[in-house]
Structures are given as structure tokens and as C-alpha cells.
């Protein structure tokens, strides 16, 4: 059971609501609620706000990123188990205290490579009303562009694309997805039935039509930062 799923389960039980009753209030199925509580379903911001109102609990304050993409952690040497002089340990404490104090107002957004691995680089953003750029802080990552295959979208090597991690398809959006074992940035367009159109960013804007079941949507591009050194 995920952390946010456990909290939803606890509040639902406190109010004496069944999965079916809560699902009806939210306009979703009983199984959908069960999958949220067990962590099998990733909850989006809209549903999270709706559940908060119905159950009278602000889940948004404590929710964390729960997706198959693990949030990258900058691997820095741990100082807790290193045998060092007392004075050195004392010198580290104020820095840790400042980092903890700033964690509620500053969000360090990691920069990932084309394979969604951390690059030891990041950008800091102010947290305003528990949001960063209007999105949940833990659902934002940067993707560093490593080639010019997206130049048709005016995105070239060295640029940074800010990604909002979620599994929903937004029509005609630049979407981060996984297809045939590859991580791709493609413009996505819904077609009739269970098919979607993927538009590449090359000069020819080549199009690929694929089955929805063969795709794994990872996130949506919301901003581009251009590297002026390569323009």
C-alpha cells in the first residue's frame, strides 16, 4: 500500500464509507478506489483535490511522487557514518538545518538524461502555495536534450525540457513516453478507437500510429529552456 493510498484508506474507514460509496461520490468505479488505496493506480492532482474535499483531509500536503519512475536522488557522500573530528561534524550541522528549513519554500528540480537517469544537476524553484510553476513540486523533472532529433519542434541539443510527471494523455501535447523499450518525446494526438498518433520532432515530422496499450505515458512537457550557447 502506498503512503497516500494508506491515508485515503484510513480516512475512508473513519467515515464508514465503502469503496463503492466513495467511488460513487468521486464519479469513479469501486475498483478504481481500491487500486488507488493499494498503490496500483497513480492519483492525479484533480482526483486528489476531490478526495480531500470528500474525506475532509488535505492529502496534498503529504502526498509524494508515486510512479514507476523513481524520483532521482543526487548521490552525495553520506557524512553520518564517517569517522570525522567532532569539529567537522559540528560544521556540517548548520548546513543540514538550513536545508531542512528551506525544504518547504525551495524545490530542487532534478535534471535527467535521455534515459531518465540523474545527471547531478538541478534547478531550484520557489514553492508558492505548495506548488511549483502551478504543479505539485514532487512531480516535476527536467530532461536534458542530448541530440538534434527534435529540431522540428525547435528543441536542440543542450536545451532543457521541464516535464510534469503523470500518466494522462493530453491531446496535441509534447509527451514523454515509453514505446518499444525506448524513452521518447513525441507530440501525441488521439485517434478514434484505441490508437494514437505520434509525431516525431525531426525535419520531416514523421508520424507513427500505435496502439494505446503499447504506450506508457510518463509525463507532459510544460516548458522549454533554450541553451543560448548552441543557438
Image (tube, helix red, strand yellow):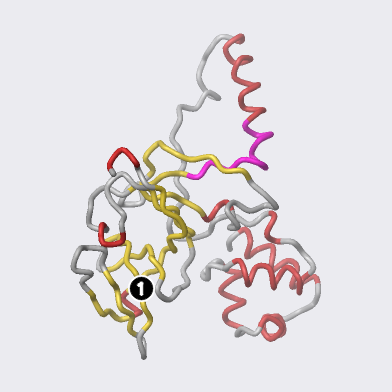
Q: Which class describes the residues within 10 Å of circle 1: few (<14), some (14-19), or many (20+)?
A: many
Task: Name the foreground residue: 41 vs 52.
Answer: 52
Q: Magenta span has 141?
A: no
Location of residue 13 in the rendering, given as x and y in whole percent from the top left corner: 76, 72
Quarter of the rendering occupied by the N terminus: bottom right
The answer to whether residue 34 is left or right of residue 220 is right
Task: Name the foreground residue: 160 vs 117.
Answer: 160
Residue occupying the point 49% across, 59% down: 164
Magenta residue span: 99-109
Residue occupying the point 69% across, 34% down: 101
Q: Quadrant of residue 206?
A: bottom left
Residue occupying the point 76% across, 79% down: 17
All told, the count of numbered labels is: 1
Quarter of the rendering occupied by the C terminus: top left
| In the image, farthest residue toward the left | 204
| In the image, farthest residue toward the bottom | 193
Location of residue 112 in the rendering, given as x and y in whole percent from the top left corner: 38, 47
Image position of 220 with respect to 195: above or below: above
The answer to whether residue 32 is left or right of residue 167 is right
- Secondary structure under tag 1 reads strand
Q: Quadrant of residue 221?
A: bottom left
Location of residue 62 in the rendering, given as x and y in whole percent from the top left corner: 67, 54
Image position of 121 with respect to 1: above or below: above
- Find disc 1 in the rendering and name its residue: 188
Amino acid at each position: 500500500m502506498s503512503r497516500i493510498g494508506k491515508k485515503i484508506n484510513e480516512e475512508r474507514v473513519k467515515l464508514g464509507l465503502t469503496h463503492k460509496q466513495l467511488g460513487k461520490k468521486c464519479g469513479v468505479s469501486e475498483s478504481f478506489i481500491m487500486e488507488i488505496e493499494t498503490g496500483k493506480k497513480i492519483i492525479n492532482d484533480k482526483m486528489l483535490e476531490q478526495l480531500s474535499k470528500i474525506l475532509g483531509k488535505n492529502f496534498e500536503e503529504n502526498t509524494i511522487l508515486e510512479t514507476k519512475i523513481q524520483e532521482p536522488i543526487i548521490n552525495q557522500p553520506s557524512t553520518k557514518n564517517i569517522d570525522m573530528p567532532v569539529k567537522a561534524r559540528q560544521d556540517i550541522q548548520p548546513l543540514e538545518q538550513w536545508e531542512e528549513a528551506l525544504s518547504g519554500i525551495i524545490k530542487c528540480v532534478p535534471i535527467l538524461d535521455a534515459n531518465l537517469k540523474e545527471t547531478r544537476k538541478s534547478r531550484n524553484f520557489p514553492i508558492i502555495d505548495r506548488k511549483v510553476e502551478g504543479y505539485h513540486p514532487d512531480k516535476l523533472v527536467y530532461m536534458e536534450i542530448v541530440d538534434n532529433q527534435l529540431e522540428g519542434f525547435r528543441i536542440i541539443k543542450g536545451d532543457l525540457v521541464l516535464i510534469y510527471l503523470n500518466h494522462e494523455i493530453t491531446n496535441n501535447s509534447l509527451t514523454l513516453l515509453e514505446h518499444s523499450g525506448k524513452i521518447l518525446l513525441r507530440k501525441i494526438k488521439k485517434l478514434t478507437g484505441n490508437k494514437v498518433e505520434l509525431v516525431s520532432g525531426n525535419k520531416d515530422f514523421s508520424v507513427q500510429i500505435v496502439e494505446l496499450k503499447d504506450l506508457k505515458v510518463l509525463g507532459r512537457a510544460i516548458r522549454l529552456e533554450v541553451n543560448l550557447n548552441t543557438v
